[in-house]
Image: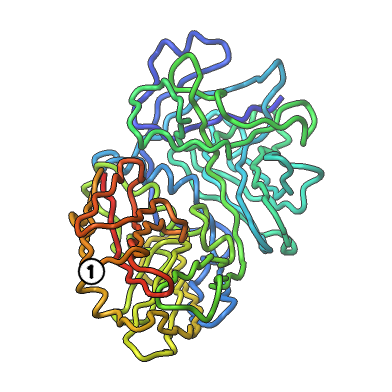
């Protein structure tokens, strides 16, 4: 039976105590010549597609699991050490391959695949053949026969190499898919070691337990049994640094070479609105552009480096979603699906020009030129809904203090009538606080409100003024 050694990226070597476990063999790690900018052993490196037109074409190699490790490490550990161990059997069966699941919300063309692998020094062959497969995924696991495969080889015994190949023909996948790597040598003594990143789950009891350790998502998979493909399972609680294995979720360092399109777009409640009503915008941009697995900007928003003095390029730190709303003053919003109140001067109506910009930073490279943009522009007609009272005169009658607020806020209202009302709305336009029978000084309890942006509306009938309120806790 040929052996496949599984490796993981880790900052520390194993304790010698692990060698006493019959199913786990720890061997010394070696520092790799780890370069973030990828060089493929087979096939060209993809070139960024730059466009501001609709249906932007993206060509990329998705190194999601490697990115998670790169972001996890501190500056002192950014180069990392790769250490290894063996999981020779699982529930009494030999493990024959390892891979990872990739989330796909639309159509995607997969042209090839890659992985980080090393040849065991004792392997008789000078170059051990390695096969890469692409599978459909159902309920989190590969299903059916492989859609395509290709074969390459690994010769290095000193550092982990990126090895990859292109399929004989491209594969169109319309949902989640998996890339799997397998030793296909005919010599049962040939051994390779597949690399893994050191992800953890949210309940990991593995030390250290800092937030940057908890990057596991159940995307790592492996296959076991005498026949390939045999039985699939995920890597959660299987591979460990310490015993027991609860909380481990390592993912194999494999990557697909992909091409897909994305379009920036939105849906809204209306394209004609009143200046006292908020318009709810729903971001309907293609899912891959809004996914942290395919857009490094989204990835950075959640998993930016912890205690990393060697900061990444500024180009990956800006937002993937930018709304430019017209009006007076113009507003820039970085929320996925904001509610916007248009502030215009009388007499109205006024046509307001807006724009949504989606920036996709590809996963294969941090450089600023490796981005693609798409945008959507539209016009909103805004009418004046205040009857007999201008927005400016209303503004002089209302004050909100303090702003930002925490548990309490006071709304000052001059010349309030019997039907004047205070409403506090959340970012979805939902009324969360209402106050009637107003006085000049009206104290509102905001203790139940979560941190975020709210809007205070004061008025009656169709005559309202709106003030933004920030709750900061």
For image coordinates 71% across by 28% down, the residue present is 224
Query: Which scheme is used to colour this image of the protein?
Result: rainbow
Q: Which residue ends up furthest to the front in the rendered image?
A: 418
From the top left corner, tell me how far across and down residue 266 is, in percent: 55, 71
Q: Report the front residue among 83 and 462.
A: 462
Give percent across and percent down for residue 151. 68, 50
Residue at the far top: name it: 20
Q: Is residue 381 above or below residue 87?
A: below
**Percent position of residue 322, x then y:** 40, 70
The quadrant holding residue 82 is: top left
Please say whether residue 129 is visible from this viewpoint: no
Q: How far across and how far down the image is residue 279, in percent?
A: 48, 70
- Residue 176 visible in the shown view: yes
- Residue that appears at 44% across and 65% down: 339
- On the rendered image, what quadrant is the N terminus found in? top right
**Quadrant of the rendering where the C terminus is positioned:** top left
Q: Nearer the viewer, residue 50 or 31?
A: 50
Image-quadrant location for residue 270? bottom right
Q: Is residue 10 above or below residue 89?
A: below
Query: Is 122 positioned to the left or the right of 131 in the image?
Result: left
| Residue under pointer 1 | 415
In this view, 24 is above or below 113: above
Q: Is residue 121 left or right of residue 33?
A: right
- The residue carrying pointer 1 sits among few (fewer than 14), some (14 to 19) or many (20 or more) residues within 10 Å by Cα, namely few
Look at the numbered disc 1 and give the secondary structure of its residue: loop
User: Which residue occupies 48% across, 59% down?
Assistant: 295
């Amino acid at each position: 039976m040929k052996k496949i050694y599984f490796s993981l990226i880790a900052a520390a070597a194993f304790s010698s105590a692990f060698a006493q476990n019959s199913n786990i063999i720890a061997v010394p790690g070696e520092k790799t010549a780890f370069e973030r900018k990828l060089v493929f052993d087979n096939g060209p490196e993809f070139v960024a597609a730059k466009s501001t037109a609709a249906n932007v074409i993206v060509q990329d190699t998705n190194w999601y699991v490697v990115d998670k490790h790169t972001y996890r490490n501190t500056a002192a550990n950014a180069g990392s050490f790769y250490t290894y161990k063996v999981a020779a059997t699982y529930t009494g069966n030999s493990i024959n391959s390892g891979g990872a699941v990739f989330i796909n919300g639309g159509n995607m063309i997969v042209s090839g695949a890659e992985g980080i692998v090393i040849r065991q020094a004792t392997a008789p062959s000078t170059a051990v053949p390695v096969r890469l497969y692409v599978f459909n995924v159902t309920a989190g696991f590969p299903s059916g026969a492989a859609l395509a495969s290709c074969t390459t080889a690994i010769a290095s015994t000193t550092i982990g190499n990126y090895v990859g190949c292109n399929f004989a023909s491209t594969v169109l996948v319309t949902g989640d898919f998996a890339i799997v790597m397998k030793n296909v040598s005919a010599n049962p003594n040939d051994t390779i070691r597949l690399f893994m990143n050191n992800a953890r789950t949210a309940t990991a009891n593995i030390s250290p337990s800092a937030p940057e350790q908890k990057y596991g998502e159940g995307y790592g998979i492996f296959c076991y049994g005498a026949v390939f493909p045999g039985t699939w399972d995920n890597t959660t609680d299987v591979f460990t640094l310490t015993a027991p294995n609860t909380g481990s979720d390592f993912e194999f360092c494999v990557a697909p070479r992909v091409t897909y399109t994305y379009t920036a777009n939105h849906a809204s409640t209306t394209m004609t609105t009143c200046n006292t009503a908020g318009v709810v915008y729903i971001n309907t941009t293609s899912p891959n552009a809004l996914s942290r697995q395919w857009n490094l900007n989204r990835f950075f928003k959640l998993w930016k480096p912890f205690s990393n003095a060697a900061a990444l390029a500024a180009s990956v730190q800006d937002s993937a979603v930018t709304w430019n709303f017209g009006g007076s003053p113009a507003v820039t919003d970085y929320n996925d699906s904001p509610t916007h109140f248009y502030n215009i001067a009388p007499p109205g109506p006024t046509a307001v020009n807006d724009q949504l910009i989606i920036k996709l930073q590809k996963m294969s490279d941090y450089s600023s030129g490796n981005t693609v943009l798409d945008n959507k522009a539209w016009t909103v007609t805004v009418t004046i809904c205040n009857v007999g009272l201008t927005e400016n005169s209303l503004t002089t009658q209302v004050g909100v203090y303090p702003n930002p607020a925490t548990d309490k806020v006071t709304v000052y209202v001059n010349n309030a009538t019997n039907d004047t009302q205070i409403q506090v709305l959340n970012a979805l336009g939902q009324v969360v606080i209402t106050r009637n029978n107003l006085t000049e000084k009206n104290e509102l309890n905001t203790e139940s409100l979560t941190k975020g942006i709210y809007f205070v509306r004061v008025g009656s009938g169709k005559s309202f003024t709106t003030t933004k309120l920030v709750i900061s806790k």
